[in-house]
Amino acid sequence: MTSRDTGDTAWVLDPILEIPHVKAAVLLTRDGLVSGYTEALSQPTAERTAAIISTVQGACRTAAAAFADKDDAQVRQVVIESDHGYILVAPTAHGTCVAAFGDPEVRLDLLAHRVHSQVARLGEKTMTAAPRGADGGAPA
């Protein structure tokens, strides 16, 4: 299994797919746009999944804040268990999110570790990226 990229994102998703029983993964923006997805998903399914995950993330932030009686909350991960398996969602510090789906036999601890490792690597790569100029290109 490999990633289908809308950018250079295979390095983020491919290591997640190495975990036994992981079926699919999506890299998305906080507002639900697909940045990359695995070949197990069609593009329409990846787009629909990204939109749903974005909505779930927003609902979880709101619920966490409400339970804590605060105005806002940062969600570190969301786990959804269903009869089809598990969805693990982890946001990054820079406005993207990694979501992975494993069947009921997946080891959730391994999946969580790998997703969070990839989120950390994604953050490191973002922090080391060269700054852009005002026009979006390389600085002068």
Image (tube, grey):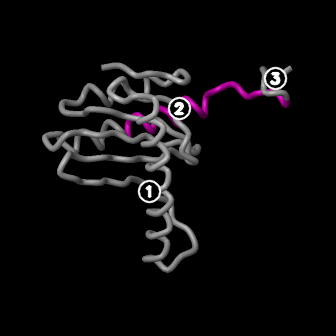
Q: Distance between the residues labelled 1 and 3?
A: 37 Å
What residue is at 57 percent from the left and 45 percent from the top?
A: 95
The residue to which callout 3 is attached is 139
Label 1: state its secondary structure: helix
Q: How far across and down, in percent of the image, does residue 44 sit? A: 46, 33
Extent of the magenta region: 116-134
The residue to which callout 1 is attached is 56
Label 2: state its secondary structure: strand
Total number of numbered labels?
A: 3
Q: Residue 58, relative to residue 138: is it above or below?
A: below
* Residue type pointed to by label 1: Val
* Residue type pointed to by label 2: Ser
Label 3: state its secondary structure: loop
Q: Is residue 87 left or right of residue 92?
A: left
Question: Looking at the figure, which quarter contains the C terminus?
Answer: top right
Q: Residues within 10 Å of mark 1 (few under 14, many from 20)?
A: some
Residue 49 figure quarter: top left
Earlier residue among tags 2 and 3: 2
Earlier residue among tags 1 and 3: 1
The residue to which callout 2 is attached is 35
